[in-house]
Amino acid sequence: MKIGNIEIEKTAALAPMAGVADRAFRELCKSYGAAYTVSEMVSSKGVTMGDRKSGQLMEISSWEHPAAVQIFGNDPETMAKAAETAMENNPDIIDINMGCPAPKIVKNGGGSCLMKDPVLAGKIIKAVCGAVNIPVTVKFRTGWDSDNLNAVEFAKTAEENGAAAITIHGRTKEQMYAPPVNINMIKMVKEAVSIPVIGNGDITDPFSAAKMYEETNCDLVMVGRGALGRPWVFQQISAYMKTGSIIPEPSITQRMIIMLKHIDKICEYRGERIGIREARKHALWYTKGIRNGAEYRRRLSVIESLDELKKIAFEISNTN
């Protein structure tokens, strides 16, 4: 499939999860076949004020492409300036977050709050499209709540204001991440616009990815929480989509090797002191479902060094 002139393999993309989809995780998922990656959401206000952390969030590896930088905010001019600054990192696409349900984002008028103001949303999309010479996409939800399911109208607004593609998470803002995903709404959005539609929500394996494709006719699927502690899910989806083959889950020992590779990379980019604290949550996800998991996760939640992590990983490999 194509977003503008950017070709993307029709397998699965990695969702822009805040606090998770950093450069290290995106690179790892890419190595397992993620067709497309999107950065963590970056504050447009932070970017325009020269915030160092915002700048770091926009960094893209040279071999990560095709990749997007995602920005959020509620002011058209500020969003346009942030998009211009994001271009310094050579993204293939600028993605606009209009779906985040986090209270601190919504409270300030960003994320899914914009679904309540399609006129403002349209102005933001138009401003960002006018500021850059690469495709601009928009990620949003089915609506604010079950009484306000306006995804179809919102999708049309995005298309009319220049969006090259849209991603729809099949839940409302009020649902947060609670089931069920509204597959039918994604299908309705796909039927309502002529630009590519990416389906997102509860894709955890090859079968749920295939179901999303089959039931919505979407152009691409996006994996979010289904990749937490399971970056190999992209390899599984890719194999199933291309050949129908099923790649089994890795062994516990393989999982520990992948976890250490991931966390080594986090520490390389962030430094060990900060990196190991960021890594704690990932370690908990990688050890989900193992024998004596509760005790191991208790220890992993307070690790202070890579050496400590490696010792626990060795223990897990030898006792599971």
Image: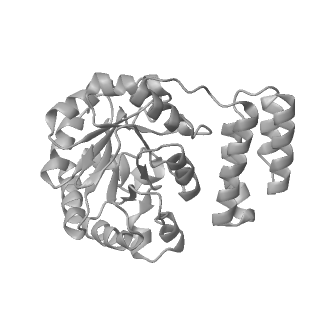
Q: Quadrant of residue 301?
A: top right
* Residue found at x 65% / y 58%: 266
Q: Quadrant of residue 298?
A: top right
Q: Nearer the viewer, residue 161 or 108?
A: 161
**Colour scheme of this structure image?**
one colour
Residue shown at 32% from the left, 59% from the top: 94
- Residue 191 x, y percent position in the rendering: 17, 31
Q: Give the residue furthest to the front.
A: 243
Q: Position of residue 294 (x, y in %)?
A: 79, 31
Residue 74 position within the rendered picture, expressed as x and y whole percent measured from the top left = 31, 60
Image quarter in which the C terminus is found: top right
Looking at the picture, tell me which residue is in the foreground, 94 or 101. 94
Question: Between 96 and 5, which is closer to the camera in this rendering?
Answer: 5
| 274 to the left or right of 211 | right
Position of residue 75 in the picture relative to residue 203 (left or right)? left
Residue 305 placement, left or right of 90: right
Residue 88 lies, with reference to residue 260, above or below; the image says: below
What number of labels is visible?
0
Q: Is residue 260 above or below residue 60?
A: above
Res 304 seen here: no
Rendering coords of residue 110 (x, y %): 36, 54
Q: Is residue 137 visible?
A: yes
Residue found 47% across the figure and 31% down from its top: 239
Residue most toward the left? 160
Say which residue appears at 37% left-offset and 50% top-offset: 111
Considering the image in quadrants, where does the N terminus appear?
top left
